[in-house]
Amino acid sequence: MPPLPPVRSIRTRMIVLFIVVITTTLGAFASHRHWLLRQDLEQRFERTRADVLESLAQSLAEPTWALNVGILRTRLDATLIHPEVVEACVFSPDGQEIYAAAGRPASPNGEPCASAGADDLLDRVVIYPPDGIDATRREVSIGKAVVRFSRRPMDGTLRAAMIQGVTEVAAIDVVLVLLLTFGLRMIFVPLERLQRALFQLASRHEEEPEELAKLGRQEFDSVIDGFNQVLRKLKLIIAERTEAELTVRAAIQRSNNAFAQIQATQAELVEKNRQLETLSRTDQLTGVYNRRRLDEALIDALAHSGTVFSIILLDVDRFKSINDNHGHQIGDRVLVDMAQRILDAKRPGDIVGRWGGEEFLIICPDTDLPDAAAQAEALRQAISAQDFSVMGAMTASLGVASFQSGDTIHGMISRADQALYEAKRKGRNRVEFGEVGVLVP
């Protein structure tokens, strides 16, 4: 009997080819997934950097202005919820003094937020005064925040994903090789038996083609069933991996949605706080500043006593008779119209508020007594020149006082009030100031 063909070499070649094809395919799939993960982590890293810096620029303005170290540390500590943030510091505008710092490991040179390592990034954001500060001062920096970001958490995630991918590819290779070996055995063992039977039949001149033919079809059907089983198992493995990836992406999306919800809630709280701050400083009837805000402005102006400023105290003439004869609703409308008339006539930089009842106070920065008196006279003329919507012609009396060396708020208000009383005594619709003289209408 002639020697049998080398069936085993064909089986070995098929196994090697199968390993190469599957390993290459799974390796390419794993590499693509690793690339997608890297892109996603890079985008998240950049978004985190931008969000942290924008949040610090907004949240650090008030505590830096007030130099409240406790709140500064609390808000810097809040940035450490992001694993990418290693350190966060607030410095003075010239960078020579550190107001507050928070971080996990120390800086490479031992100084907070001084330098970045090979995997670190240093980002800086300039801090400006909060919204309630005079517009001319809000352009001047009151400090700067420095944040040290690290790529190490992202690199660790990528390394773990790479190790997991290699492990999965190796495990799948082992499983598939075992399955392929079993399947090939189901193919080649019957083929060897069939081949021996054919040679035996040929040597003995025995003819049983139908039986052999049936035997061949039956064995190949079993081999096909084995391959179908391998294919189903391969599809199951891919489906499980795809489901795992979808689960991870869904978790990432939920995390992003939660973070976006936190940001939206934080922005809403900031807006509510701003509205409450506005309400606490605004007169509810007229919309101008209230007594509390005027007191703050006077204290701030007096604290900078090296600059000249003046105040104008305005009283609506015969307002009590309006309330008595026409009712408080008409009186309230007169006050609203008077406030708008004052706002229309004031200069840029002047601060207008309701001092109490029918009295309004105008704070005039960088204005000496003659200029303040001229401004008061212009305001008086603007009030009397045009009829009011509910009462027709209206007038006001005004008292002017200017800052003097060693002055106090009570002293300035008293002088302005005395000048206002003098204007009332002399017939109303006048501007009076005791230091220099009288502007007669």
Image (cartoon, rainbow, N blue to C red):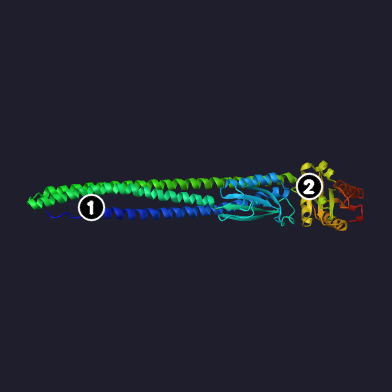
* x, y percent for residue 269: 64, 45
* x, y percent for residue 384: 83, 54
Q: Secondary structure at mark 2?
A: helix
Q: Label 2 belongs to which residue?
A: 296
Q: Is residue 281 left or right of residue 316?
A: left
For this orientation, the residue located farthest to the left is: 205
Residue sitting nearer the eye, 267 or 175: 175
* x, y percent for residue 353: 78, 49
Q: Is residue 253 left or right of residue 191?
A: right
Q: Label 1 belongs to which residue?
A: 8
* x, y percent for residue 338: 79, 50
Q: Which badge, 2 or 1, is on the more N-terminal residue?
A: 1
Q: Do labels 2 and 1 touch, CB within 8 Å?
A: no
Amino acid at pointer 2: Glu
- Residue 344: which quarter of the image? bottom right
| Quadrant of the snapshot with the C terminus | bottom right
Q: CA distance from mark 2 to mark 1?
A: 96 Å
- Residue 338 seen anywhere in this rendered image of the structure: no
Q: Nearer the viewer, mark 2 or mark 1?
A: 1
Q: Is residue 349 left or right of residue 262?
A: right
Amino acid at pointer 1: Arg
Q: Which mark is residue 432?
A: none
